[in-house]
Image (tube, rainbow, N blue to C red):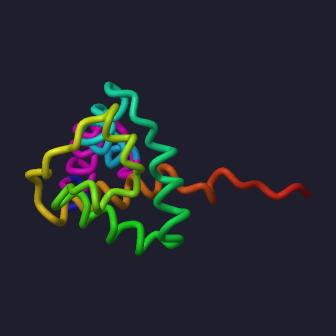
Amino acid sequence: MVRNICGGMIVLFLVLGGESSAETAGRSLDLACLSCHKEQKIPSDLIYRRYLMRYSTADRIEEAMFAYLKDPLQSRSIMPPQFFLKFPMKPPLAISDAKMRAYIRDYIDRYDIRKRLSLER
């Protein structure tokens, strides 16, 4: 039995390439969402800061992002109208709600400014 568990863990390690679940989630976020942001030069950190200023908590940001991504309307966007002169309105995403929420949580985790704050000792 121990051999089966160890063998399974080795296979899982090889399949994931030794990545942690956070690294795997980050890679998924990059492939599913941020690759287009980078290609179109849409500043994701700026977008996150706008959400943070308007909604202030991760839960409220997640709900606002989810609503926008399910039905992207300019009236639901946190970006000013001039933004849409340069960047096209995105089409609704055709992914499950659970996966969309996971991507949003990964996005919030990646751009969370609390990780960038440091206190001097």
Q: Residue at x 14, y 51 (%)?
A: 93
Q: Quadrant of residue 68?
A: bottom left
- Residue toward you, 26 or 65: 65
46 up-or-down from 98: above or below: above
88 up-or-down from 29: above or below: above
Task: Write down the region rendered in magenta.
Answer: 4-22
Viewport quadrant of the N terminus: bottom left
Callout count = 0
- Residue toward you, 87 or 103: 87
Query: As drawn, which residue projects farthest toward the right?
Result: 121
Q: Quadrant of residue 4?
A: bottom left
Q: Quadrant of residue 121?
A: bottom right
- Residue toward you, 81 or 17: 81
Name the spot of residue 86 as percent of width and height, x first.
34, 31
Q: Residue at x 33, y 67 (%)?
A: 64
Q: Residue at x 50, y 72 (%)?
A: 57
Which is the main secondary structure of the residues drawn in magenta? helix
Image position of 88 (left or right of 42): left
Name the spot of residue 63 as percent of width and height, x first.
32, 71
Name the spot of residue 75 as percent of width and height, x first.
28, 61
Image position of 19 (left or right of 28): right
Q: Residue at x 66, y 50 (%)?
A: 116
Q: Is residue 72 magenta?
A: no
